[in-house]
Image (spheres, grey):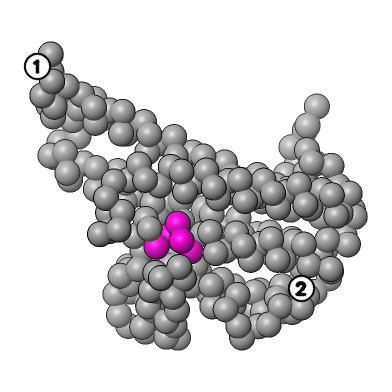
Amino acid sequence: MSQKQKHIMELIPIFRKIIESLEIIKKEVVSKSGIDYKSQDARMVALDSIQISISSVGMWIQCCNSLANFHTKEGVFNEVDFLQSVGSGVNKDQTEMIMFEHLKLGFMTLTHFKIDNLFQNILKHLNTLPKKTGYWNLTDAILDQCSIPKTGTEKEILTAFANLRNSLHGNGIHRTSNLTLTIDEMEFKFINGSRIDCASWEHIVVLLKANVDILGKVLLSDKVRSINTEIKDDFASTINQN
């Protein structure tokens, strides 16, 4: 945890607010585009998936926190029973670090994949998918279609999230262009060849919230909200809704 965030349970109300923000965007998309709320439209699928990912992480955190409340009859924390309950061979602090670190990295990666896939689906529908691959070109194309500057804060926020995900390929080292930005008083610094030190839970949640705000701008832009037919999601279209 950071100095500002004293306990991982502090993430739960923040998660709820982000889920609520996604719900507002979903309802606005339905209202403006006329698509069915329960449809397999790529916009609804992506927003649903991000909500589910956030909810899942929240449930895991609360589950782990409840396990940590093992106490003896005398009210003393029973570390042995706790460690046995999760099958750990190391101490409590190491166990929590291992469990939450993997949860955090998986959450960050899966969430970013959903955003990446959503942008691809929208651009495919508009027949404007860039010939050059890569998230940088993808975000340039989606921002351009939505009349959002490609050199502004939105581009930096989208790039920062991609930098965190891509750092996993580089074993925690940033391998592309330098980028420094501040979101809600939280600094994100990416220096080529240097270790990334902005991947705490607090950093990821702040960055996710900022990315969700951009999703709202993209999905409610004139170009995208005017799409009143379902945008295909290849995987979702294979699911039988009956």
Q: Nearer the viewer, residue 69 or 231?
A: 69
Q: Is residue 235 above or below residue 125?
A: above
Asked if the stretch drawn in magenta spans residue 205, the answer is: yes
Packing grade of label 2 (10 A; few <14, some 14-19, many >=20) is some
Q: Quadrant of residue 91?
A: top left
Label 1 sits on residue: 74
Packing grade of label 1 (10 A; few <14, some 14-19, many >=20) is few
Query: Which residue corresponds to the image point at 30% horizontal and 80% vertical from the top-left?
Result: 194
Q: Position of residue 128 (x, y in %)?
A: 80, 74
Query: Which residue corresponds to the image point at 42% horizontal and 85% vertical from the top-left?
Result: 178
Of pointers 2 and 1, the one earlier in the residue sequence: 1
Q: Position of residue 239 (x, y in %)?
A: 74, 37
Which portion, as a residue range, is magenta? 203-207
Q: Secondary structure at mark 1?
A: loop
Report the magenta stretch's main SS: helix
Q: Give the residue type at disc 1.
A: Glu
Q: Give the residue type at disc 2.
A: Cys
The numbered dot on residue 24 is none
Between the residue at mark 2 and the residue at mark 1, the CA separation in whole angstroms equals 61 Å
Q: Position of residue 191 (x, y in %)?
A: 36, 83
Q: Quadrant of residue 90?
A: top left
Asked if residue 76 lies left or right of residue 214, the reply is left
Q: Is residue 218 above or below residue 95?
A: below
Label 2 sits on residue: 146
Q: Is residue 73 above or below residue 87?
A: above
Asked if the stretch drawn in magenta spans residue 168, the answer is: no
Q: Secondary structure at mark 2?
A: loop
Asked if residue 164 lies left or right of residue 233, the reply is left
Query: Which residue corresponds to the image point at 38% horizontal and 51% vertical from the top-left?
Result: 104
Query: Which residue corresponds to the image point at 78% horizontal and 32% vertical from the top-left?
Result: 241
